[in-house]
Image (cartoon, rainbow, N blue to C red):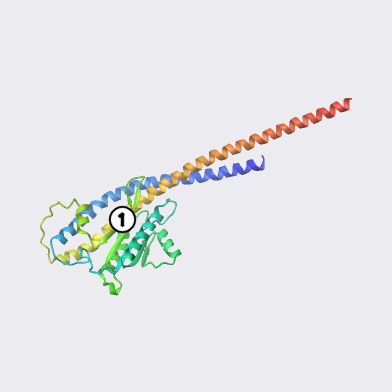
Amino acid sequence: MGAQLRVYKRRIRSVTATKKITKAMEMIAASRIVKAQRQVAASTPYATELTRAVTAVATGSTTKHPLTTEAEAPARAAVLLITSDRGLAGGYSSNAIKAAERLSERLRGEGKEVDTYIVGRKGVAYYGFRERKVSDSWTGFTDSPTYADAKQVAAPLIEAIQTETAEGGADELHIVFTEFVSMMTQTPVDDRMLPLSLEKAQEETGGKDQILPLFDFEPSAEDVLDALLPRYVESRIYNALLQSAASEHAARRRAMKSATDNAGELIKSLSRLANAARQAEITQEISEIVGGSSALADATAGSDE
């Protein structure tokens, strides 16, 4: 076997092994998407009803509360960015990071300081490589988040929104995550969680024309909002984590399918090159045999004369 043919054979074996790996990762991601979609569907009604409850309290009282009342001159905003712990998911993490960068630039343009909180190793690595300050970070659960993880992430954010700006608190709380639209479409979005926009909340929970029931608040509307604040933030973060997990699996499945298809095309191309090299070797060997035979025949004819 010639040297060139050995090179092609070795590359074909290498690409074939890679194709098996990417195909397995594609199948794993596809199986996890179903579970993630179910979790998203299960968590959405709770988040919607909780938002409706907060809207009812806010519209039914005149209480000023960090959950519903905007600061007169907001000076600091907290931004939570959700990325992935692992790569091989196409542009999933980079698109979310770009959305967070655009949001931070817009907030700074409005004269606000930005405190960044990050979920996922990819986001942590991005900010760490550029030596940018990160207020807090969490890793290790992006592909399968639980409500306990959401509570862990929400704790410092709730503390920040309840603390005065002069003491390191925040006037606004924003979240950047990837919304799962379909198996083929995942869209990075930025959303302001706090203060809650009542108009937007009404649209999310059934429209502006919905009739809310009358409530009596015990012991007071402020105490009710204090109790709902952590639940609201936790549920929104949990839903965002689940949406991001489903988007991550879908993006990884699509990336691995593309890699598998490309590996198949590369194997076909290398096989054609290997066949051409083999044919060239055979042709050369035949030419050498014919040439040797002709030389031998000429030598024999010369000796007969």
Can residue 262 be spotted in the picture? yes
**Crowd band around label 1 with a 10 angstrom C-alpha radius: few (<14), some (14–19), many (20+):** many
Task: Using residue 270 as the reference point, say whether residue 111 is left or right of it.
Answer: left
Where is residue 138 drawn, in percent x and y? 37, 62
Residue that extends furthest to the front in the rendered view of this protein? 109
Residue on which the image places disc 1: 240
Q: Residue at x 38, y 45 (%)?
A: 30
In the rendered image, the quadrant that contains the C terminus is top right
In the rendered image, the quadrant that contains the N terminus is top right
Where is residue 13 drawn, in percent x and y? 56, 43
Where is residue 45 drawn, in percent x and y? 23, 51
Q: Nearer the viewer, residue 97 or 123?
A: 97
- At numbered mark 1, what does the secondary structure look like: helix, strand or loop? helix
Q: Residue at x 31, y 55 (%)?
A: 240
**Residue 146 is drawn in which quadrant?**
bottom left
> Amino acid type of disc 1?
Ala
Q: Is 117 rendered above or below residue 166?
A: above
Task: Using residue 223 as the reference point, say whether residue 248 is left or right of it.
Answer: right
Q: Is 34 rendered above or below residue 84?
A: above
Residue that extends furthest to the bottom in the rendered view of this protein? 167
Q: Is 288 rendered above or below residue 142?
A: above
Can residue 141 be spotted in the picture? no
Where is residue 175 drawn, in percent x and y? 31, 59
**Residue 277 is drawn in which quadrant?**
top right
Q: Nearer the viewer, residue 37 or 282?
A: 282
